[in-house]
Image (cartoon, rainbow, N blue to C red):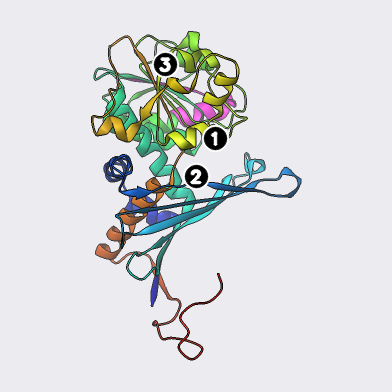
Amino acid sequence: MSLLILSARDVRELLPMAECIAVVDAALRRLAAGDAVQPLRTLMRLPAGRGLLGMMPAQVGGAGGDHAIKVVSVFPGNHGTGIDAHQGAVLLFEGRHGRLVAVLDGSEVTAIRTAAASAVATRALARADADSLALVGTGVQARTHLEAMLLVRKLGSVRVAGRDPTKTEHFTAAARERYGVDVTACRTVEAAVRGAAIVCTTTNAREPVVRGEWLEAGCHVNAVGACFPSARELDGAAVARARLFTDRRESLLAEAGDFLLARSEGLVGDEHVCGELGDVLLGRVRGRRSDDEVTLFKSLGIGVEDLAAAQSAVAAAQARRRGSTVEFGDPGEPRDGGATHAPV
């Protein structure tokens, strides 16, 4: 059988942000409706603390539905080397016979679908008139988040803060040229965040970079970067003052340092989690209740988002005859005298 291979360039061209926002929205609704299987990710720590190997499976559509797994190695030491800290692939299987049908560049899928999920959250939770954005971070996720935010809100100004002033200046110059919006480099995170109606944190920070006292009344925050229990981008005060939503409650309670560390400080309890984003989309949980309320979407990144993005990219590739194909596996003929099962 033929196996479709989609490179990073293929994924970028076949998975436009607007389309990915739509499919991630639909996937989160299906998850909330019980039409998906979404276990916690599994992490294997590599020797000498060099990195992690993560495995993120998901399935949608009941019996016969497609399933996928993203396998990703995370090497924080890659930062500054020109090599992405996240390396991996999404493997898409069809549900009728369980055949592997496509392999997609995992870094590019992650870059697009993560920002798409934040866009879904912003559309559901941010004020309708939110017109200013603070981006904390200048990496890949900052780039894709800017693209995504521009699709769901009419932004009059964007302020950017990063660790490296030179990179921040380069990022803002490129963004101004590409999108034609007012993008300003800020010397401090506080300067970027104060007064912003939307805040996106896309960093590798382990200690808080955003404090609750900086958040404008009525702002919406997408906290994206910290996905481990010991890491946080927001201090406890920021979490405590916000109406908190997430992509998957189980993931938040197991992995989200932003919430877990605030809870350990006695600032919040489990009841502080208002619900999953899919529940808001289905109308089961109320999102924003007033123009002055601070809302927070804590993004962990889950397998159903990878699966939905992969399905969309593969469908586009098949329609446009894009990607590479290789012969993989056998035509389904029984082996070893008709035996159809082997040890896993």
Gap in angstroms between the C-alphas marked 2 and 3: 25 Å
Front residue of 172 and 119: 119
Secondary structure under the numbered disc 2 in the rendered image: loop
Q: On the image, which quarter does residue 266 sit in?
A: top right
Q: Which residue is drawn at 49% across and 31% down?
A: 202
Q: What stretch is highlighted in magenta?
A: 157-172
Which residue is denoted by mark 2 in the rendering? 40
Task: Report which residue position mark 1 lands on.
Answer: 255
What is the three-letter code of the residue carrying label 2?
A: Leu
Say which amino acid is labelled 1: Glu
Q: Where is residue 59 in the image (x, y as percent from the top left)?
A: 38, 54
Q: Quadrant of residue 125?
A: top left
Disc 2 to disc 1, C-alpha distance: 9 Å
Look at label 3 and name its amino acid: Ala
Quick check: 99 above or below 78?
below
Position in image of residue 163 (x %, y %): 59, 25
Q: Are marks 2 and 1 in contact (CB under 8 Å)?
A: yes
Q: Which residue is drawn at 48% across and 37% down?
A: 251
* Residue drawn at the location 55% of the way across and 19% of the way down: 262
- Indicate the position of residue 166 as horizontal and vertical percent values: 57, 27
Is residue 262 within the magenta segment? no
Query: Does residue 117 appear in this view?
Result: yes
Which residue position holds label 3?
Answer: 242
Whichever of labels 2 and 3 marks the residue nearer the N terminus, that label is 2
Q: Quadrant of the N terminus?
A: bottom left
